[in-house]
Amino acid sequence: MNLRWSFPPYPVGWVSRETLQGYIKGNDPISGAPLMDEIFSALTQPLTDAEKHPKIYKRPDRPRLLKPDTEENLYRLFMENGWTDGLPIILPTEERVAEMLTGTDHDPQEIVGMMSVTTHEERLQYSVEKVAVVAVMAGARPEHFPVILALGASGRPSMPSSTTSFASMMMVNGPIRNEIGMNSGLGSLSPVNYANSIIGRSWTLMSICLGDMRPGATFTATTGTTINYNNMCFAENEENSVWKPFSVRKGFKVGESTVSLFRGWNVLTMNIGPAKRMADVMKNFGGPFGGAFTFICDPLVAKALKQEGYDDPLKLSEWLVNQTSSPFKRPEMVNFIVAGGEMNPMWVISDFSYLQSVSVDPWIPKAGVKKDAKPLRMPLPVACKDGSCGISH
């Protein structure tokens, strides 16, 4: 669609009423025409032939392969073209991509989804092979590929274009968590787990390479956020939770592997206390719109809340909403996740909204998750036992 655009000067937030009135009485800074005359004309003038029959602009496809070069020059090429997150990558050679493709039974040219970090440009479609390229770049192995494909199937970028600075979070439920060695316990939000790290990073690289993230053009976050490096990727601690898994509460089957996506601005850590304390923090915490909250609770917190009578997190959501006066808050917008190593009954509150959950199962090979002969794992954090703490392999 050829839309008619008018622009006031910027910024429009946190400026005086007099300044805004001046914008209205002034000129469009792009066209130079009086702003209100331009708006009235756009709303009342008949469509032109070009507007009735718009020429569809489609960006040319990128070549499938790059010309051979040295490793150093290829690293530089990826960096200078903005195809990375600024951190070192694994170069996606044909051999490495072919190996990644063994992590699913789907045809390499099958379309997985469409994505754009902005709303004013076309959503670009991408194949299984293109997602495999991103997975290789992130440092993934074929066993991780089904979860990364499910991310791609969501069609959601981890870094949507907005002048605010959105952060994202992703959580995995179901058997796939343990199959690929994801961390749901001690330090689950810390950089101590291979699978958590590279799956979360894959979402970022997917947004850059497949969602066409270009700073200043399609990505306009004023400060950005370090959360987007890994997008708070972790698994839910289903084994030590007193509640049903989050995915089951969202309508998926018991035993089904899923990835759930969240988006917000702020994360406030180091909280402790019962439901009343949660309500007090909610009243004074939230994003620009103050409607959504997602609590990440250590299993000890969930157990304590159940002892308070909240055997179902929805009951707790309803009670918390009733303690606040905001008309924007609704029970379904207050979510609870269980993760942590039972070291301390602490919870994290965020203003993240739950976006959607996607099933991982359709992307898993019929023969099962494709693992290396000796799967790559980082040292496994273990809880304190008999008064001592340690690291086991």
Image: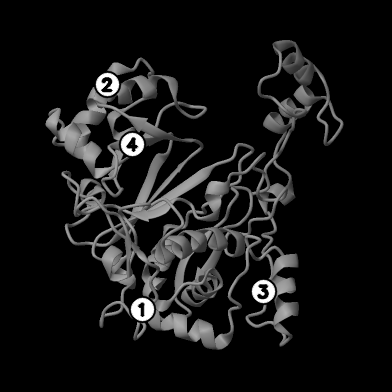
Q: Secondary structure at mark 4?
A: strand
Within-10-Å neighbours for mark 3: few <14, some 14–19, many 20+: few
C-alpha span from label 1 to label 2: 44 Å
- Judging from the image, the colouring scheme is one colour
- Residue at 47 percent across and 65 percent down: it is 198
**Which mark sits nearer the N-terminus, 4 or 3?**
3
**Which mark sits nearer the N-terminus, 1 or 2?**
2
- Residue at 50 percent across and 71 percent down: it is 135
Vertical arrangement, residue 55 with respect to residue 246, above or below:
below
- Residue at 56 percent across and 72 percent down: it is 137
Of discs 3 and 2, which sits in the foreground? 2
Amino acid beneath label 3: Arg
Q: Say which residue label 1 marks.
A: 375
Q: Secondary structure at mark 1?
A: loop
Q: Is residue 132 left or right of residue 283?
A: right
Vertical arrangement, residue 71 with respect to residue 313, above or below:
below
Whether tag 3 and tag 2 are in contact, CB under 8 A, the answer is: no
Q: Say which residue label 4 marks.
A: 347
Residue 276: which disc? 2
C-alpha span from label 3 to label 2: 55 Å
C-alpha span from label 3 to label 1: 34 Å
Within-10-Å neighbours for mark 4: few <14, some 14–19, many 20+: many
Q: How many marks?
A: 4
Amino acid beneath label 1: Pro
Whether tag 4 and tag 3 are in contact, CB under 8 A, the answer is: no
- Residue at 35 percent across and 19 percent down: it is 280
